[in-house]
Image (spheres, coloured by chain):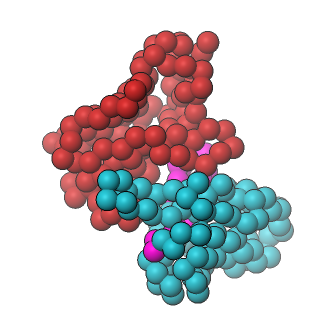
Chain colours: A red, B cyan
Amino acid sequence: GENVEQHPSTLSVQEGDSAVIKCTYSDSASNYFPWYKQELGKRPQLIIDIRSNVGEKKDQRIAVTLNKTAKHFSLHITETQPEDSAVYFCAASGNGNQFYFGTGTSLTVIP
Amino acid sequence: DAGITQSPRHKVTETGTPVTLRCHQTENHRYMYWYRQDPGHGLRLIHYSYGVKDTDKGEVSDGYSVSRSKTEDFLLTLESATSSQTSVYFCAIYIFSGRRETQYFGPGTRLLVL
């Protein structure tokens, strides 16, 4: 099956700086890559996603890039704010209904 | 929240007792999932369902069983709870809308096995 690795496990940045979280996947059949944000005590919630026919996608301060050849994808958060502090999960899906998750990155934005 | 709820939200039980967690959805989605979330492990799939009475195992299915007798309900049973099953359990549904496909999660159930 698919194996998704996520790095780093923890990340601290100063408010206003950028944050980058990276994931790799193993199955070349994976074609959909969502990112989830989970605040403390809450459910994971989708924040952005990308399909394999697209190399980059942006939504305000967050962006995701995908390198199919290298089998890695990344989440970029610019101009970080304290409310960006949370755990972020990447995931990969190939058959449309099974998702494989990374182990999460705990992001702390220091005011 | 895609009409997905879980019950109970919190439960404390003793080792060896059976426990059933319920996931309920209101939008008639075909696919439903149970995950457990533990520090350092992210979200791990326990079981999933692709229709009424159609279920399959995930990567951490040992000690768990599921049932889906109605589209809207997906039950997770810990047959004989152990301390290693102390975790946060999330139910999820798969939504495909043409432009977006993803899993939406329920609010979670915190289970403590003493």
Residue B36 included in the magenta stretch of the image: yes
Residue B63 lies, in percent from the top left, at: 62, 74
Q: Quadrant of the N terminus of chain B?
A: bottom right
Name the one closer to the observer, B109 or B107.
B107
Q: Which residue corresponds to the image point at 53% horizontal and 69% vertical from the top-left?
A: B27
Side (left or right) of B89 relative to B112: left
Is residue A27 found inside the magenta-colored segment of the image?
A: no
Residue A77 in view (yes/no): yes
Does residue B81 appear left or right of residue A45 in this picture?
Answer: right
B114 versus A65 height, above or below: below
Give the magenta range. Answer: B30-44
Residue at 54%, 13% (x, y): give it. Answer: A15
Q: Is residue A111 left or right of residue A19?
A: right
Which quarter of the rendered picture does the C terminus of chain B lie within?
Answer: bottom right
Residue at 36% over, 44% down:
A49
Quarter of image, res A77: top left
